[in-house]
Image (cartoon, rainbow, N blue to C red):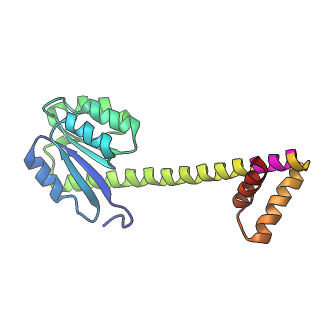
Amino acid sequence: MLFKDYTYSVLIVSSSEKFVGSIRTMLPENEFGPIEIAQNIGVARRKYAERGFDVVLINTPLPDEFGTKFALDISADTNSGVLMFIKSDLYDDITEKVIDYGVLTVSKPISASMVHQVFKILYAVQEKFRGFEKKTATLEEKMEEIRIINRAKWTLINNLKMSEDEAHRLIEKQAMDTRRTKRSIAEGIINTYNN
């Protein structure tokens, strides 16, 4: 198993039961799950809207549309990894349309070893996205903490006529003395003076 801490949810979009069966055997349960199947784009869109997926595999063409628009929509609006399986005679044209949007493509027919290689690329891309999401969440939390502390400082400045430096030192000192975070102290100050 490549990534022990995370299991990828997968949506397989294919009208071919044979394709679905062969792909499912390549997706170990300890790495992928849940795995859902959609036999056309309409069903795929509904399933995706209900829960979202980490990975979307599209076996083109599909009965209600080719699959390119769905791949582009998912890739543009989400961090899902999208992989399209395309007949060799259409491969270059379709790849040219989707590659700039981060959609991976492979030409059919494809060997099992090639599918495994492409899945490893998908793993790497998804892990990179997950790393960015974690960093973004950490930065957003830090920015929110700074906003709360600044709001508390201004509350002290307005209510106790302190300077900004004095307000900052007071928050830091209370945090050290009480072994609480500066954010916790700041929230207490805001609640005290705004009620």
* Image: magenta residue range: 151-158
| Residue that sits furthest to the front in the current view | 195
| Residue that sits furthest to the left in the current view | 18
Q: Number of marks in the image?
A: 0
User: Which residue is at the front of the view, 129 or 185?
Assistant: 185
User: Which residue is at the front of the view, 22 or 91?
Assistant: 22
Q: Is residue 107 above or below residue 7?
A: above
Q: Left or right of 77: which side holds 87?
A: left
Q: Main secondary structure of the magenta part?
A: helix
User: Which residue is at the front of the view, 111 or 173?
Assistant: 173
Q: Is residue 24 above or below residue 173?
A: above
Give how far across and how far down residue 101 sits, in percent: 37, 35
Q: Is residue 77 magenta?
A: no
Give how far across and how far down residue 78 sits, in percent: 39, 41
Give how far across and how far down residue 95 sits, in percent: 27, 34
Quarter of the image with the N terminus is bottom left
Q: Is residue 154 magenta?
A: yes
Q: Is residue 100 above or below residue 171?
A: above
Q: Residue at x 75, y 51 (%)?
A: 190
Q: Is residue 94 above or below residue 78?
A: above
Q: Quadrant of residue 48?
A: top left
Q: Residue at x 33, y 52 (%)?
A: 121
Q: Residue at x 73, y 57 (%)?
A: 188
Q: Left or right of 189: which side holds 163?
A: right
Give how far across and how far down residue 94 sits, in percent: 25, 31
Q: Residue at x 73, y 71 (%)?
A: 179
